[in-house]
Image (cartoon, rainbow, N blue to C red):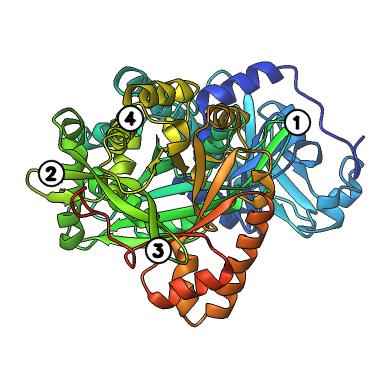
């Protein structure tokens, strides 16, 4: 027994039934307009308030279509449909659940949605196993006529056939993926470029189509190794997202993001998909019994404009651009028109030419001075990579670094900048006694301490003269491997700085256990020092300075552009600064 009545037994063919369910991939895609239409017709035929297409999973029933009910699942032990699949091919009719010992005290009967009448017709696979039901529900006692029941049985047969067809399509897609697409090891999804190329070869997209670029943002985690760094976490999140998508959608993995193509979906439909994904991710994502993670969603949406033939690459690239402009947990929508296609052409050139930039010496390093307050004496410089493209001119890093991470060549770029900066510092070309070098999250690997040590020895530079800057995307507070790498660097004498501090999720409390010697305050905090929010910004900066000082961590303010900002920073006790007010990034002779 369960609270509320009698739990359904497991059918004798439970293992085979679940095997069919897995093989058909019924839960690997979300809403299906054709299944929704069948459920809608069932409600009309039976003249009931609710109609559902219910799939019986191992521990829950999942609604592939729901008319008149705002829910997507219930526990299997409370489900009527769990009983219905025990009937073989025969319908299960419950005229009045209040009079049925199995259901009289069921909370679905005694409370919302007040299930009084139920009729469920099993959905049989071609092997004869019931994977769920097409059911109609009402809040008052009912009977069905023979004609109504026959019509519902025909609809159930159509639904089962449609699910089988969808399963064949998914199986064919998986075979194509296995033979023609590069796969992401952690999620099993195709990689972004492979998916885009394969969709493009299938022919033009419908005139109105969309793409999503989404990033799962960790809110909280539980377990000894919880969060997005936990083994299987990304796979669990990707399955949850896949289960929220329409059957025609294609999903892929890019660095730190998921990208989704929605053929035939306009802007409203694409935003509705984002809302469905948000709702699906609202609860804890269980990775394993002792590990779970709560995530939120940041999303960019791109939709083809009227009269514009947008390619899959156009849509995905513009969605990625939209995501880059979106604040955490936000949503930005863009339309692919002639203007964005010009931007897309530039993006395509950057992506296609980037590998050659690394091998053909087109990358250059500029330096921006770091000064000590209050006097403004230079103590060192930050090394900043630029790309001198033969046709597009000087390209800033925010335009090409994300692609370098996607393409797997960011480590080569990081290594080039590191060696160049150490060489320039060693020959006295860099002002001051230290140089700061940015390191991508992708480069934070076990071999990094040995690589840095080798380059320091080759350049004959003391470890204490090197500062490695990491962004909060590294999530060093969550991944023990990353924490150990940082400790190894710290033990060797290399200093570690956290860039853009205050824009992400890292707290000062986490820094007590890590060898972090410098915090670079995010430029948004510095900008606000002379804006309408200046009092709050000043208080935040002053508080961070005091707390960091207590932890023995020095603070650097970046993005200083005005004398007034400098003066406030001096008053707040900030010891280091960087920004256009003190010097713009430039080649060595200009820095």
**Residue labelled with disc 2:** 389
Give the alpha-carbon distance from disc 3 to disc 4, as whole Å: 30 Å
Residue 88 position, x and y percent, is 69, 26
x 53%, y 27%: residue: 492
Q: Are marks 1 and 2 in contact (CB under 8 Å)?
A: no
Q: Local crowd at mark 4 within 10 Å, few (<14), some, or many (≥20)?
A: some
**Residue labelled with disc 3:** 376
**Which residue is situated farthest in the left direction here?**
391
Q: Quadrant of the C terminus?
A: bottom left
Q: Are marks 1 and 4 in contact (CB under 8 Å)?
A: no
**In terms of secondary structure, where does tag 2 sit?**
strand
Q: Kindly report which numbered mark, 1 or 4, lies closer to the viewer in this rendering.
A: 4
**Residue labelled with disc 4:** 415
Q: Is residue 99 visible?
A: yes
**In terms of secondary structure, where does tag 4 sit?**
helix
x 47%, y 46%: residue: 471
């Amino acid at each position: 027994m369960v609270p509320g009545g009698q739990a359904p037994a497991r059918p004798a063919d439970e293992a085979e039934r679940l095997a069919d369910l897995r093989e058909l991939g019924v839960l690997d895609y979300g809403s299906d307009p054709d299944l929704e239409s069948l459920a809608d017709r069932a409600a009309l035929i039976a003249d009931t308030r609710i109609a559902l297409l219910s799939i019986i999973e191992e521990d829950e029933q999942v609604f592939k279509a729901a008319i008149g009910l705002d829910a997507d699942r219930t526990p299997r032990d409370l489900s009527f449909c769990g009983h219905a699949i025990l009937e073989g091919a025969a319908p299960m009719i419950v005229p009045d659940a209040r009079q049925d010992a199995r259901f009289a005290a069921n909370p679905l009967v005694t409370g919302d949605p007040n299930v009084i009448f139920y009729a469920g017709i099993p959905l049989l696979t071609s092997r004869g196993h019931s994977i769920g039901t097409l059911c109609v529900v009402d809040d008052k006692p009912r009977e069905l006529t023979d004609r109504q029941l026959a019509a519902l049985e025909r609809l159930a047969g159509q639904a089962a056939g449609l699910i089988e067809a969808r399963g064949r399509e998914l199986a064919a897609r998986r075979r194509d993926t296995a033979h023609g697409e590069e796969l992401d090891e952690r999620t099993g999804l195709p990689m972004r470029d492979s998916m885009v190329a394969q969709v493009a070869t299938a022919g033009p997209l419908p005139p109105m189509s969309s793409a999503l670029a989404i990033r799962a943002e960790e809110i909280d985690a539980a377990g000894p190794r919880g969060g997005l760094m936990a083994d299987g976490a990304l796979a669990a999140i990707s399955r949850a997202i896949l289960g929220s998508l329409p059957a025609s959608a294609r999903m892929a993995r890019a660095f730190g993001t998921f990208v989704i193509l929605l053929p035939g979906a306009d802007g409203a439909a694409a935003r509705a998909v984002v809302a469905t994904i948000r709702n699906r991710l609202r609860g804890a994502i269980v990775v394993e019994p002792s590990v779970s993670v709560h995530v939120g969603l940041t999303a960019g949406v791109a939709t083809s404009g009227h009269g514009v033939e947008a390619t899959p690459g156009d849509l995905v690239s513009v969605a990625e651009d939209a995501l880059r402009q979106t604040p955490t947990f936000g949503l930005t929508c863009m339309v692919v028109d002639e203007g964005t296609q010009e931007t897309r052409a530039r993006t395509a050139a950057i992506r296609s030419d980037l590998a050659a930039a690394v091998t053909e010496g087109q990358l250059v390093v500029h330096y921006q001075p770091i000064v000590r307050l209050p006097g403004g004496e230079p103590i060192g410089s930050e090394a900043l990579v630029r790309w001198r493209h033969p046709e597009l001119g000087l390209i800033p890093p925010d335009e090409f670094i994300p692609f370098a991470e996607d393409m797997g060549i960011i480590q080569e770029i990081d290594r080039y900048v590191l060696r160049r900066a150490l060489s320039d510092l060693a020959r006295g070309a860099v002002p001051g006694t230290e140089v700061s070098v940015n390191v991508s999250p992708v480069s934070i690997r076990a071999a990094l301490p040995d690589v840095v040590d080798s380059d320091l020895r080759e350049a004959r530079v003391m470890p204490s003269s090197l500062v490695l800057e990491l962004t909060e995307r590294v999530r060093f507070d969550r991944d023990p491997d990353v924490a150990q790498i940082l400790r190894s660097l710290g033990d060797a004498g290399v200093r570690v700085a956290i860039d853009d501090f205050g824009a992400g999720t890292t707290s000062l409390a986490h820094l007590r256990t890590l060898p972090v010697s410098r915090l670079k305050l995010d430029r948004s905090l510095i900008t606000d020092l002379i804006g309408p929010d200046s009092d709050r910004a000043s208080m935040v900066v002053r508080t961070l300075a005091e707390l960091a000082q207590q932890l023995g961590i020095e603070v650097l303010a970046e993005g200083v552009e005005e004398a007034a900002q400098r003066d406030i920073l001096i008053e707040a006790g900030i010891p280091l600064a960087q920004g256009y007010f003190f010097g713009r990034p430039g080649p060595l002779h200009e820095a």
